[in-house]
Amino acid sequence: MCLSHLSAAYLTGAFDAVTFGGIVTFYLMLSIFLAAAAYFLERTDRRNFLNQLRAALLYRQLEVNSERDELTGLLNRRSLARIGRESWSAEAETPVVSAILLDIDHFKRFNDLYGHIDGDACIRTVSQHICATVGKANCVFRFGGEEILVLLPGQTSLQALATAEKIRRAVEGLAIPHGKSDHGVVTASLGVASAMPAQMAIEKLLQRADEALYEAKHRGRNTVVIAEEPQIAA
């Protein structure tokens, strides 16, 4: 638009040469200034956007790391509390949730015999194979020490029992040497419990899984025990 006006003014001779040159210089400097201002403003906005994106990604990474166990990479107790609230909320549509509580057999003896470095490696290896066995659709937590918890949303008690048996065979199949074990290799005992979130709190479900785990140890370890189904009122 400015160029067309200047061209018309030049052709009509409305200004003398000095005045016209001054006008052209003014508009040229104004255009350069506006272009430079637009460039630096856009660059500042782009830099601010990238900084905000980095901050959001860093916060998300810190949030994810805070819900992971440092040794095994499994979910931790904090994530268990969050997932428990989500699964047991009034809006949740999960009809049944099963829990598998696993304990590595004679793990204290393993640490005493091989040392804590090998003990940590044993827990990591077992944890990785449990995750591979149950799949990404289920949640695997380091419940404490050598105890590992698996939550199976949507799986009935019999389905969870089959999954627990797969885990037991997978751990034994690793054939990690354990000189003080009853079987010569690292094994695991597992307790299984199931509940409908609308009728049983998650704390009670975990308590029943822990009782089944204790019974599995009592029966000689390297075995799976399922908790008795509670009586449900009509």
Image (spheres, grey):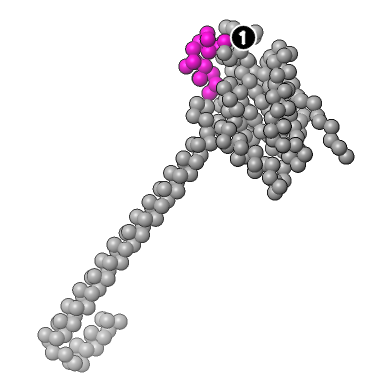
Taking 148 as reference, is 91 above or below it?
below
| Position of residue 195 measured from the top left corner of the image (x, y, whole percent) | 75, 35
Dot 1: element: loop
> Residue at the spot x=71%, y=12% of the render?
220
Taking 124 as reference, is 30 above or below it?
below
> Residue at the spot x=70%, y=28% of the render?
207
Front residue of 195/25: it is 195
Task: Please tell me in which quadrant of the rendered image residue 39 appears.
Answer: bottom left
Tell me the amino acid under the disc marked 1: Ser
Q: Look at the image and tell me whether residue 208 can be seen.
A: yes
Front residue of 99/204: it is 204
> Residue at the spot x=73%, y=18% of the render?
215
| Position of residue 213 measured from the top left corner of the image (x, y, whole percent) | 70, 21
Taking 118 as reference, is 46 above or below it?
below
Crowd around label 1: few <14 · some 14–19 · many ≥20 (10 Å): some
| Position of residue 74 measured from the top left corner of the image (x, y, whole percent) | 55, 31
Give the left or right position of residue 60, taking residue 17 as reference: right
| Highlighted magenta segment, given as a residue range | 109-125
Task: Please tell me in which quadrant of the rendered image residue 131 appears.
Answer: top right
> Residue at the spot x=52%, y=8% of the render?
113
Residue at numbered disc 1:
181
Front residue of 233/216: it is 233
Q: Look at the image and tell me whether residue 172 can be seen.
A: no
| Image quadrant containing the N terminus | bottom left
Task: Please tell me in which quadrant of the rendered image residue 175 appears.
Answer: top right
| Position of residue 200 measured from the top left corner of the image (x, y, whole percent) | 75, 36
